[in-house]
Image (spheres, rainbow, N blue to C red):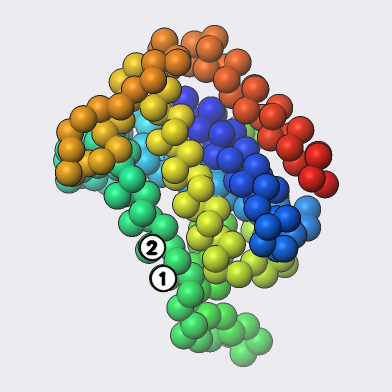
Amino acid sequence: MWRSHMVIGASSWLAAQTLAAPLTGAALDARERACGAVVAAGAALLCDVDTPDSWLANALGPVTRTAARLIGRVFGGHRRGTHSLLFCAAIAALSAVTLARGELVHISARWTLTVGQLAALAIAYGAASLSVACLLRLRGARAAIVTAALVAVAASTTPPAAFVSAAVTIGSVSHLVADVLTPEGIQPFWPFSARRVSLRVIRRTGDGRETLLVLATALITAVIAWGYA
């Protein structure tokens, strides 16, 4: 379920960043870790853009539902093209290239940003708005205020392009890992192979096993993060 994907996406980012910090020497402060977690949580919903039944596809009503139907047709239906390693690699490459763009955009006399910085803000806004709508159940003006506050905090961290791209990539890949645990599985090597991979750890979406798995993931991540704090 979308809640599970968001929790697993955020947990995957926090665990990966925590474990990689001693090796890379790139320690992040609390705001940067939170920013990455929000981006990864939002990115964890991207793969379900292939079906009008997903929460992401209903985020903007008819607009996103129509887009989801078209994307589903292009990628062969639900849990096919958008649930593949190729799709996640494309997302990673697109985000990395876009975020690295250095052309200047003059917002006003005081504000000048690069294309990459604008893209980072757009990603942060999209991920934050999804998090606010899904997890906090806020809509309208209240959602806009909370989202703006989250984006302002994210902007104050001035994260590098690689940071945001890594969060997007980890979030999208976490979706594949989670869906492999379900009976339906995924086609990870689409379009080169139609073989469907499933570990069948979860009997059906939203059952007790899924809840326990998500709680365990969050708990293990918290332990890892605490141990390396």
Residue type, numbered disc 1: Val
Residue named by callout 2: 93
At horizontal 30% and vertical 38% (from top left) the residue drawn is 188
Q: In the image, 69: left or right of 201?
A: left
Residue 108 seen in render: yes
Quadrant of res 46: top left
At horizontal 61% and vertical 69% (from top left) the residue drawn is 160
At horizontal 38% and vertical 62% (from top left) the residue drawn is 93
Tag 1 secondary structure: helix
Judge by depth and name the residue closer to the eye, 136 or 102.
102
Tag 2 secondary structure: helix
Residue 133 seen in render: no
Residue named by callout 1: 97
Judge by depth and name the residue closer to the eye, 207 or 151.
207
Q: Position of residue 90 (x, y in %)?
A: 33, 56
- Mark 1: few/some/many CA within 10 Å (<14, 14-19, 20+): some
